[in-house]
Image (tube, grey):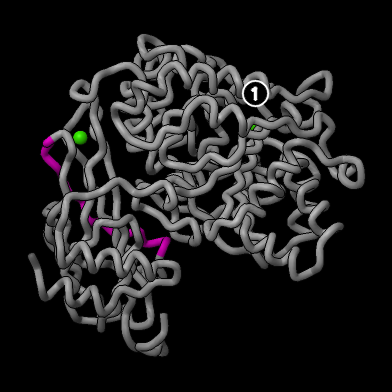
Amino acid sequence: MFPRLLLLFEVLLIGTSLLSATAESRDRAMNPSPMKPVSSSHKPRLLVLTDIGGDPDDQQSMIRLMTHANEFEIEGLIASASGTPGELKRDLVRPDLIREIVESYGKVRGNLSLHAPGYPSEGELRKRIKAGNPERGVANLGEGKDTKGSDWIIAAVDRPDPRPINVTIWGGSTELAQALWRVRNDRSPEEVKRFIGKLRVHAIGHQDDTGPWIVREFPDLFYILSAAPEGRDKRESAYRGMYLGGDESLTSREWIETHVKDGHGPLGALYPMKTWTAPNPHSTLKEGDTPSWFYFLPTGLSDPAHPEWGSWGGRFERAAGGLYRDVKDTMGGTTDARATVWRWRPAFQNEFRARMDWNVKPYREANHPPKVILNGDGTLAVLRVKTAPGKEVRLSAKGSADPDGGKLSYRWGTYPEAGTYRGKVDLRDAREPEAVLLMPEGAGGKSIHVILEVTDDGIPPLTRYRRILVEGKGEGQGEGKG
Ligand SMILES: [Ca+2]
Ligand SMILES: [Ca+2]
């Protein structure tokens, strides 16, 4: 198609974890064949710890997760102590609430599977529902405190599999803390290091004292803490962008009734309409925990190894060791950590809406996302290219297609906060399938993140992404450096 361009990218594709993607993209470039679904072995492994049974927003997040269950290998759905400390009158765990949702998922799974491959069976998911310790906190860690939940985490990490285990924490982290305590107690330092190295944690706040304990005791652990800085209003947390800021009409009661609750089958019917935290403009959709798994969702936008690059689940910067904290994006004149999530809300709400249609509609009556090709590469990998200031970088989405035969629109833009070059960038033909980036004169040694958004014309319109990291040659950055 574009031999000169392809050659450029063959040479310049640099991979930290992307070597196989390079080989794959080369194959595809030389032999453009119809796209195959990503095999299950490439799916992110996901382990959920939820304080379900407190604020009903955990049920909301679980219902949405079920509609995206084909995108992950769900390794565990663990009921940790219900509610945040002091929220409920007694200590309890509610795995029954997870089972209720999984059971309703079982009723629509057949229909979901008409729209996309890879939805796990109800039985497979049921086996992965585990209960944790109803008594939370550091005081409840140690000998004799293992639970089905903490044992399950250890077993999942120990399973021979090269992929990391992505742990999302929707409430307290007692189960993860106990798993870490057990492993450190029983194993050699080398084995503990190996165990820690397989984990990626995305925590929605520190909802009890085991969170700070984990960060203190295991400083090398990859740990994203989505939370407002100490001393600030907790409602400033990045994850609150799920429901606060941006276009709040997309989280209204009416939106949920129309697109989720009514006429969308038994799973949607379970969606709780009232959540607890104020202020919430509608007190309906909150889903404060959803950004934790959005972070690992493969959309082409992000790379979970790089919290600083941003994703539907927010953007974070390294604080110390393996710890990452909230950082702010500027959108439409607002500078706010929540903007790192709400900036994607139109896309993630449309995605939810389409998938709720998948619960009940035949294929031809629902929309399905486009497949995006970036410079001949059909994977979801982030591409990298190095170029000298003043030179042009040619960008192409040729070959992108919509499975419904819809018309695609293209939007090339930069994500300034994700890169290190913050000046103006000239992107020519930014609404065309092929665009040109002119590497600014001041961009030597700096990076520019170009995001390609491809949106179809279905109802609702669906968006998929690709990202290319353009690095400027010169000014202290050797050409051989990745
Ligand atoms: Ca929660
Ligand atoms: Ca479509």
Quadrant where the C terminus is found in the figure:
bottom left
Q: Residue 158: x percent and y percent?
A: 66, 54
Q: Residue at x 29, y 29 (%)?
A: 115
From this viewpoint, which residue is outermost toward the top?
Answer: 263
Figure quarter occupied by ligand 2: top left
Count of numbered circles in the view? 1
Q: Is residue 409 magenta?
A: yes
Residue 333 visible to the viewer: no
**Viewer-proximal residue, 474 or 399?**
399
Label 1 CB less than 8 angstroms from ligand 1: yes
Q: Residue 231: x percent and y percent?
A: 71, 48
- Give the residue at mark 1: 55
Quadrant where the N terminus is found in the figure:
bottom left
Q: Residue at x 81, y 67 (%)?
A: 188
Q: Residue 114: x percent and y percent?
A: 29, 26
Q: Which residues are magenta?
A: 405-418
Q: Residue at x 50, y 61 (%)?
A: 305
The answer to which image quadrant residue 378 occupies is: bottom left
Q: Residue 481: x percent and y percent?
A: 41, 84
Q: Residues within 10 Å of mark 1 (few under 14, many from 20)?
A: many
In the displayed structure, 478 sits above or below 438; it is below
In the displayed structure, 473 sits above or below 6; it is below
Q: Residue at x 34, y 21 (%)?
A: 111
Q: Which residue type does callout 1 highlight? A: Asp
From this viewpoint, which residue is outermost toward the left?
Answer: 1
Relative to 14, is 374 on the left or the right? left
Q: Is residue 30 magenta?
A: no
Relative to 202, is 184 on the left or the right? right
User: Secondary structure beneath disc 1?
Assistant: loop
Relative to 141, is 365 on the left or the right? left
In the displayed structure, 268 sits above or below 288; it is above
